[in-house]
């Protein structure tokens, strides 16, 4: 199993991870739907996770995988809070368009 | 004896503090008594020092503390009392006491009574520091102090615009001179590495003559301002705006002689700079004649005396300029007595005339003002040089010294002395002889001054009569005053034969008596009373208008400076500096306005900016 992983060069993981991360970044910047924005954030986090796992395996160091667990937990918590805020926003504004949310100034 | 030295200036300072801080509550009698007695006490202490120095001419020193220590400059707050300074101190505190006493009567009705005495005490303190210091900085401190007091007292009735202007004029003209003095002191420090008298005068020979010439010239510029010499003399006549005792004390007897004191004090330097001495002599001579010519045409009793003071100071500088420092000091002394007397007498006249100062409105006052008239006559006889009054001896000694130096200068000085005779007798006659020309109201109120005012007059009159005997003509070999100053100034040299001296003295005396008698007769005629300002013409108009020197200064200096200031104001200040400051403020506010637009409150924008910032940071990291 390790060998099959090692047969895939590390660069591939890097490229895939970068592509996923960039998609996430662009999604956060471009999309207006708050749910999609949250999903894009998850995408960025998972791109990082993938990178950590890949390096951990290649270097034979388990620390990286421990980090991934942490990130997953934090991401789950963040998604929970984010979605609950979103529900409240929806109740107040009848929408989830982040461009409509301009009350932070006040 | 050393221990009492600091007390002498400290007492007037105490008087100043008490009168200045709590004078209003103390009542006029206490203020007057206190102000006078501190000066009198200083006078008594000074007499003690004087007696010591008479026995032993060794200077007394007292260093209180180190005043300044910066790099190699160390200045002691130290006193040097030698025969020269103790003589000045005697004049300052002695005449000062009399004038304080007189002021009790003269200023009695004034609201600012305590303020007046506070200023007078402060003046005595500053003037004492000026003559008692043992270094140039102490002298400069006193020099500025008396300048300040002069300003405060000229503008004592500051609610009158003219008076306040006169005070400012005096202060500003003095500043011009002070700048010269200050530069001179800087140069002394640069050349000698010290500003203590002892270091400077002992090493005077070690410095190159060009520097000495420059130093002495700069010091003399200071003297020019303080002692009202051409071209900085115009402030002194205007300074007559102050109360009359001030004119007597500051602008006749003491402060204006500070310049002469400075030259005599620094005579060790001046001896090495013959060019500067020549400049001093000629400037003194020009001032003396010019001021006397103006004095001829003045109709304000105090203005005549003011120009007379300028003229007499000029004579002292001529004497100093020909190297006769002792004669300059002698004339300074007698002048202090008779000019203070004349001013106080004029004050008594003004007091009696309900504030009138124009001699065209006076006349015949000898009948009502007996004491004032007699004392004033003594002062007049002294200043014009009638035997045996003080001016006769001091002026003749001066004339003899000048003749030894240059007969041409002697002739010019004699001319100046002759003018003095005419304008002084003119003023005296117009004031005290002929018929009364004032208003009916003034005639009814004519009265002799109270004795607190006449006693100082009598004391000064006695001094004007006797002080000449301090130094009899050289051929008598009874020159006490020259001998007194010998330890400081060296033995006086007499190359003149007895007959020459007697002839010179005879000429001067004949001129004084002849012209004096003529002027006395001449100005008693009713048609010789000066015409009103509009009706005069020719020389009288020229002289009456002070040869338009003020107008000249106005056109040459003041107007261009005002024009330049306005230029600086409208262009440099209003446009450049204000523009710069306002521009910066506008820039910041505009920038803030722009940046404020980013704070929209929209989450989308924030997210975008956050990511964009992150990307920029990464890019920056890669490029770096």
Image (spheres, coloured by chain):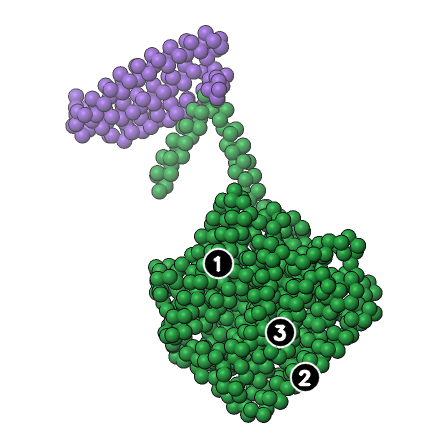
Chain colours: A purple, B green
Nearer to me, B251 or B467: B467
Q: CA distance from mark 1 to mark 3?
A: 26 Å
* Residue at disc 1, secondary structure: helix
Q: Quick check: A61 above or below B385? A: above
Q: Which residue is mark 3?
A: B382
Let me know if marks 3 and 2 both belong to one chain: yes
Screen quadrant of the N terminus of chain B: bottom left
Q: Position of residue B210 (x, y in %)?
A: 47, 78
Task: Give whichever of B361, B313 is nearer the camera.
Answer: B361
Residue placed furthest toward the top:
A91
Q: Which residue is mark 2?
A: B510
Task: Give the percent coordinates (x, y) of residue B8.
Answer: 43, 60
Q: Earlier in the sequence, mark 3 or mark 2?
A: 3
Between the residue at mark 3 and the residue at mark 2, the CA separation in whole angstroms equals: 15 Å
Of callouts 2 and 1, which one flags the residue occurring earlier in the amino acid sequence? Answer: 1
Residue lying at 45% horizontally and 77% vertically, measured from the top left: B485
Vertical relation: B81 (above or below) B415: above
Protein chain holding label 1: B
Q: Secondary structure at mark 3?
A: helix
Task: Residue under label 1, please give it.
Answer: B39
| A64 left or right, relative to B361 | left
Q: Earlier in the sequence, mark 1 or mark 3?
A: 1
Asked if residue B6 lies left or right of residue B158, the reply is left
């Amino acid at each position: 199993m390790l060998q099959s992983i090692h047969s895939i060069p590390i660069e591939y993981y890097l490229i895939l991870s970068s592509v996923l991360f960039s998609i996430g970044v662009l999604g956060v910047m471009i999309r207006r739907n708050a749910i999609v924005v949250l999903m894009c954030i998850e995408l960025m986090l998972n791109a990082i996770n993938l990178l950590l796992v890949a390096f951990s395996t290649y270097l034979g160091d388990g620390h990286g995988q421990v980090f991934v667990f942490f990130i997953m937990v934090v991401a789950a918590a963040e998604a929970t809070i984010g979605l609950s805020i979103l529900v409240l926003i929806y109740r107040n504004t009848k929408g989830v368009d982040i461009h409509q949310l301009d009350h932070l100034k006040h | 004896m050393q221990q009492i030295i600091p007390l002498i200036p400290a007492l007037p300072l105490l008087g100043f503090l008490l009168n200045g801080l709590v004078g209003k509550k103390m009542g006029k009698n206490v203020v007057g008594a206190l102000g006078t007695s501190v000066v009198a006490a200083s006078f008594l202490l000074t007499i003690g020092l004087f007696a010591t120095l008479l026995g032993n001419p060794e200077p007394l020193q007292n260093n209180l503390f180190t005043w300044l220590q910066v790099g190699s400059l160390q200045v002691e707050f130290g006193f040097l009392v030698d025969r020269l300074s103790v003589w000045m101190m005697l004049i300052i505190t002695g005449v000062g006491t009399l004038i304080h006493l007189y002021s009790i009567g003269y200023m009695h009705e004034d609201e600012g009574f305590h303020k007046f005495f506070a200023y007078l005490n402060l003046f005595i303190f500053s003037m004492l520091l000026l003559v008692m210091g043992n270094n140039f900085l102490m002298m400069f401190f006193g020099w500025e102090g008396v300048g300040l007091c002069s300003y405060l007292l000229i503008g004592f009735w500051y609610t009158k615009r003219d008076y306040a202007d006169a005070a400012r004029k005096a202060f500003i003209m003095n500043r011009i001179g002070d700048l010269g003095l200050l530069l001179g002191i800087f140069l002394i420090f640069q050349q000698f590495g010290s500003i203590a008298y002892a270091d400077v005068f002992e090493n005077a020979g070690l410095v190159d003559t060009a520097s000495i010439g420059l130093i002495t010239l700069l010091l003399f510029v200071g003297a020019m301002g303080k002692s009202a010499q051409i071209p900085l003399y115009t402030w002194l006549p205007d300074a007559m705006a102050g109360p009359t005792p001030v004119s007597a004390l500051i602008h006749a007897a003491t402060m204006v002689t500070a310049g002469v004191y400075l030259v005599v004090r620094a005579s060790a330097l001046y001896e090495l700079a013959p060019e500067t001495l020549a400049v001093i002599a000629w400037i003194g001579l020009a001032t003396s004649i010019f001021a006397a010519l103006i004095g001829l045409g003045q109709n304000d009793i105090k203005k005549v005396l003011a120009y007379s003071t300028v003229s007499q100071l000029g004579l002292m500088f001529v004497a100093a300029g020909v190297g006769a420092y002792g004669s300059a000091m002698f004339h300074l002394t007698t002048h202090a007595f008779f000019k203070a007397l004349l001013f106080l007498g004029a004050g008594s006249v003004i007091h009696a005339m309900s504030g009138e100062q124009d001699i065209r409105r006076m006349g015949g006052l000898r009948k009502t003002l007996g004491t004032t008239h007699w004392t004033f006559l003594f002062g007049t006889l002294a200043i014009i040089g009638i035997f045996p009054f003080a001016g006769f001896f001091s002026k003749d000694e001066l004339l003899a010294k000048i003749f030894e130096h240059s007969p041409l200068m002697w002739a010019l000085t004699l001319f100046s002395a002759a003018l003095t005779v005419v304008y002084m007798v003119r003023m005296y006659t117009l004031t005290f002889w002929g018929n009364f020309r004032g208003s009916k109201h003034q005639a009814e109120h004519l009265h002799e001054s109270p004795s607190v005012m006449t006693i100082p007059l009598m004391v000064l009159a006695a001094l004007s009569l006797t002080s000449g005997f301090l130094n009899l003509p050289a051929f008598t070999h009874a020159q006490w005053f020259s001998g007194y100053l010998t330890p400081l100034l060296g033995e006086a040299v007499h190359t003149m034969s007895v007959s020459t001296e007697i002839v010179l003295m005879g000429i001067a005396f004949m001129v004084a008596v002849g012209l004096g008698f003529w002027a006395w007769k001449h100005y008693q005629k009713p048609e010789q009373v000066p015409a009103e300002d509009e009706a005069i013409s020719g020389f009288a108009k020229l002289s009456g208008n002070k040869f338009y020197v003020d107008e000249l200064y106005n056109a040459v200096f003041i107007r261009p400076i005002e024009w330049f200031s306005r230029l600086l104001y409208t262009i440099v200040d209003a446009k450049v500096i204000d523009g710069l400051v306002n521009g910066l403020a506008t820039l910041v506010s505009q920038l803030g306005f722009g940046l404020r637009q980013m704070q929209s409150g929209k989450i989308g924008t924030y997210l975008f900016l956050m990511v964009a910032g992150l990307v920029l940071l990464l890019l920056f990291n890669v490029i770096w």
